[in-house]
Amino acid sequence: MTGEDRQPRSDIRGVVRGSAPAPLSILDLATVGAGYTAGQALEATTDLARTAERLGYHRFWVAEHHGMPGVASSTPAVLLAHLGAHTSTLRLGSGGVMLPNHAPLAVAEQFGLLEALHPGRIDLGLGRAPGTDPATARALRRGSLEDGEEFPRQLSELTHFLDGDFPTGHPYARLSAVPNGPQRPPIWLLGSSGFSAQLAGRLGLPFAFAHHFSAANTVPALELYRSSFRPSDVLDEPYALIGVSAVAVPDGGLEAARHLARSAALGMLRLRRGMPTAIPTPQEAADHPYSPAEEDFVESWMANVVMGEPGRVADGLEELRKRTGADELMVTSHFHGHEARLRSYELIAEAYGLSG
């Protein structure tokens, strides 16, 4: 395809609303806090999606994780179908589906079905990590030898299933992913290192980087994405979003925000130690007897959270956008308490004058 013939997709770039310097979106993990059930967490996620649409956030993604008591979004396709039925304009997507855990045909069918249910609103974000511990990954992939190193081949196979264009003579040339409508969901590559950044650039795909848990790699990965980028029939120039942890509070300043954020930090500490739990309460996090090494981990993790009262959060997000050159910001708040998380997203929207 020549540059003159290329017709880049119009459903990738986000919409800027209010005074925000870039499109604002949300990544949600269906957070299960201590004292709550998975059902209550999913009700909260549904409420948050409706609120995000009303507030004017551009897209709402959910992530695949397994074996984590604090995360209820183990199957993004199922949850996205539900969220689509409770919203009408919000873009919905996976942030992401961990492709090595699945047969590409199965993913093509799931997201073809989602596109048929909610046309023009679905994003297919793909990652190559397992989204879990090694033992759970082996259980998920039983009978399969797929791993992250096979990701480019799996991605190619998935794309051909979505487009229905396997070359003649390919073993799957006569197969079809059904349903398969006139337009497939756009594919995004997700990453926390340079591998997917370079692959997304080489294929001319949009790229989402997990700044919220790999902040040291953000700028190098985005630079690699941009330097590797080749125009495609999807994008004519790079488009990158970053996930960023944020906690906004109505009053109490930085200390009030830190009190909430430490619940997420303790949850991450337990996960890293192989002892995942539901997300602890802020009081439990405050009372935890941290060793010096644990305190160092918590402080290091919290250093990458943008937090405080709304104006401070808006300033922090803008500083991060300028420093990284990100085209879109995807805010995530994985701390305890649905009402506090919901209020945080409302305050950020109000700081920018967003409207749905």
Image: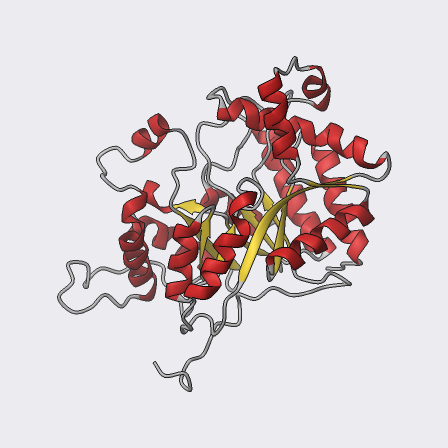
Q: Find residue 248 and report its horizontal and vertical position in percent.
A: 76, 41
Q: Residue at x 80, y 31 (%)?
A: 255
Q: Find residue 155 and report its horizontal and vertical position in percent.
A: 32, 55
- As rendered, which of 345 and 36 lies closer to the eye? 345
Q: Is residue 75 left or right of residue 104?
A: right
Q: Find residue 283 and report its horizontal and vertical position in percent.
A: 73, 19
Can residue 326 be seen in this snapshot?
yes
- As rendered, which of 176 and 319 lies closer to the eye? 319
Q: Is residue 240 left or right of residue 181?
A: right
Residue closest to the far bottom: 4
Residue 189, by quadrant, is bottom left
Can residue 37 be seen in this snapshot?
no
- As rendered, which of 87 and 59 lies closer to the eye? 59
Tally the numbered discs.
Answer: 0
Q: Residue at x 62, y 27 (%)?
A: 298
Q: Is residue 210 left or right of residue 201?
A: right
Q: Is residue 143 left or right of residue 202?
A: left
Q: Residue at x 19, y 59 (%)?
A: 172
- What quarter of the picture does the C terminus occupy? bottom right
- What quarter of the picture does the N terminus occupy? bottom left
Residue closest to the far right: 251
Colour basis: secondary structure
Q: Residue at x 61, y 25 (%)?
A: 296
